[in-house]
Image (cartoon, rainbow, N blue to C red):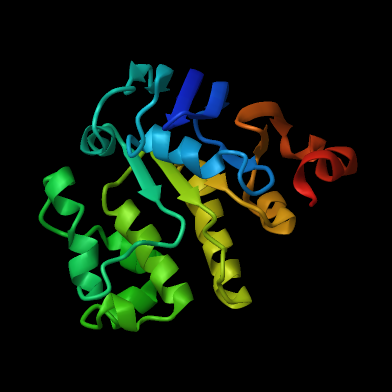
Amino acid sequence: MLEVSGINQFYGESHTLWDLAMEAPQGACTCLMGRNGVGKTTLLKAVMGLLPVRSGSIRVNGADLAGKPAEARARAGVGYVPQGREIFPQLTVEENLRVPLGVRRGTTIPDLVFDLFPVLKEMRRRRGGDLSGGQQQQLAIGRALVLEPELLLLDEPTEGIQPNVVREIGEVIRYLNAEMGLTVLVVEQKLHFARQVGDRFCIMDRGRVVTDGPMDRLDQELVQSYLTV
């Protein structure tokens, strides 16, 4: 599904991603892990086309999307939930959800969004900025799902969220992945949550992928080496 190869990315003169290679297999949930500042968010933004790369390829279903704008990647089936949610606080819930329809060229919000997040239907006339943090995260995920993506990128979806909503988000990710076959790449710092939703792990350190594999191979040695401060 997603194959990243030889990616080099720079912020000015600062080299942030170094010949990075990784993949998110079709139909799996891959957890991208590592300490703060190792390049996880940078990688997701590069995949989505929000940051330019100096070299390398980014393939989704075999098509190289490197160099193409974000809207082209959205049309190619990539949905993105950014860190911090980035909803439009002055727009209503429904207006936030309708924003991606211009890319999908649809006219209606898919029923799936409201089936997964009933609270969004109840609050569809409320402004996004008036929602709680957990509700805003649900809105951000719902907005990405309006695109009906084949690949869903989530950047720390549990950050700053109350535990009951974290559980709901975990259940939604597992449903989308296991029941609907959606390929998921999620940046996650919470080890328990990663083990709950993930089939595979991919660990980054200093702008490179250092190891990956099935989630049951994420042992204590790897946790201590790359995930603990």
Q: Quadrant of residue 32?
A: top right
Front position in the image: 122 or 127: 127
Is residue 32 at least partly visible in the picture? yes
Residue visible at 25% across and 83% down?
126
Please tell me whether residue 154 is drawn above or below residue 30 in the rendered image.
below
Q: How many marks?
A: 0
Front position in the image: 42 or 140: 42
Please tell me whether residue 164 is drawn above or below residue 115 in the rendered image.
below
Query: With 105 as the anchor, is 144 left or right in this view?
Result: right
Please tell me whether residue 88 is drawn above or below residue 187 in the rendered image.
below
Is residue 24 at least partly visible in the picture? no
Q: Tell me where residue 217 appears, x and y as whole percent.
A: 81, 35
Q: Tell me where residue 15 appears, x and y as whole percent.
A: 52, 27
Residue visible at 64% across and 45% down?
198
Front position in the image: 174 or 66: 66
Q: Quadrant of residue 113?
A: bottom left
Residue visible at 25% across and 73% down?
93
Q: Tell me where residue 5 appears, x and y as whole percent.
A: 50, 17
Query: With 190 as the anchor, is 25 left or right in this view?
Result: left
Q: Quadrant of the N terminus?
A: top left
Query: With 167 as the anchor, is 226 left or right in this view?
Result: right
Q: Tell me where residue 187 appears, x and y as whole percent.
A: 57, 47
Residue visible at 63% across and 75% down?
163
Q: Residue furthest right?
A: 221
Front position in the image: 119 or 3: 3
